[in-house]
Amino acid sequence: MQPVQSVSCQSSNLPRSATNKALARICVWMLAALGILPLQAQERGHISGAATYALTKELLAVAPKRFNGSPGHKAAEEFIESHFQTEAKEHRLDIDTFTASTPAGLQTMHNILVRYPGKKDGMIVIGSHYETNYPLKDIAFVGANDGACTSALLIEIGQYLRTHPPQGYSVVLVFFDGEEAVDKWSAQDSLYGSRHLAAKWSQDGTLGKIKAFLLADMIGDKDLDIDQDGNSNSNLVELLKVAAKDIGHPNVISKDRTPIEDDTVPFARRGVPVLDVIDYDYGPHTNQTPDGYHHTAQDTLDKISPQSLQIAGELFLELIRLVDQR
């Protein structure tokens, strides 16, 4: 093992008028030239994991239970929409309302879409679901990792795109409703929002414009270990590995490749290149919790971390950049 070379980012030769931004750029290039920092770092944006964590805490405070038809479900929608008032004024926020036939009867659901126009023809979709599991409505299940933190992450991505508009493909954020089963998971009882939107976009031609559909699910786990989803597009899985390496966290990508049923599936079945960014192995597996914290009352704020959310935010921004380059 060789010691890392010492690099100074100070120079008395720089003119006093040089800005901090220019100095920082020089530092990045110096570090990149020495192999200490990836050259792409200068082009990447920044999303705060601490801010995403704080936003998750806020969402859980106003809408701890968000199952279909509950006051918390409505509160969660209002919370999400309140963070996109600028986009709403510019007619770039859409509420996709539909009625789903479920084992509990007809239920009204709402997908929330936020659009950020780019400069290239085509779009990148980034999605997550925001509701909690309907069968768990009678226990203290709040879904801190399963729906809350990824909704917060999408809000943070939106705030970033508001001040850093896409220079490549347009980006569409989708907060999906009805991802969870209403009774018991099956092809008919799950993924209501994504099945509806995939069918709708298939009819109006939008699907053909999607260059990549990136899904965020359960990525706040303190012990972050992102699956290589077997139902995802293999090229995008490889791109995920590149993104993780680019941001300096290659070890957060698991070596396991497991197919996962998620909101990506209805789009994949219609030919859209999809990538599920998910850490499904969440918490210890015991006799009491064979699936870890997943779908238990233990999926609480203390089980997730700002550090994992920081990595996740950087991953998605890097994925946008890499898809734009393809």
Image (tube, rainbow, N blue to C red):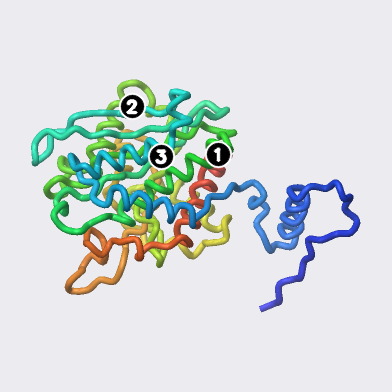
Left or right: where does residue 111 sit relative to residue 83? left
Residue 213 numbered tag: 3
Q: Name the residue under label 2.
A: 201
Q: Name the residue under label 1.
A: 326
Label 3 – label 1 distance at C-alpha: 14 Å
- Residue 125 x %, y %: 42, 37
Q: Which residue is drawn at 37% across and 29% down?
A: 207
Q: Which amino acid does label 2 sit on?
A: Trp
Sequence-first tag of 1 and 2: 2
Quarter of the figure with the C terminus: top right
Q: Nearer the viewer, residue 191 or 129?
A: 129
Q: Which residue is drawn at 24% across and 42% down?
A: 73
User: Which residue lies most toward the top here?
Assistant: 204
Q: Which amino acid does label 1 sit on?
A: Arg
User: Which residue lies most toward the bottom here?
Assistant: 1
Sequence-first tag of 3 and 1: 3
Label 1 – label 2 distance at C-alpha: 23 Å
Q: Would residue 145 be seen by someone viewing this image from the given angle?
A: yes
Circle 1 SS class: loop
- Residue 151 x %, y %: 37, 46
Say if 137 sits above or below 290 in the image: above
- Residue 169 x %, y %: 53, 32
Left or right: where does residue 278 sit relative to residue 315? left
Q: Which amino acid does label 3 sit on?
A: Phe
Left or right: where does residue 197 sit relative to residue 119? left
Foreground: disc 3 or disc 1: 3
Q: Nearer the viewer, residue 259 or 310?
A: 310
Q: Which residue is drawn at 42% across and 40% down?
A: 126
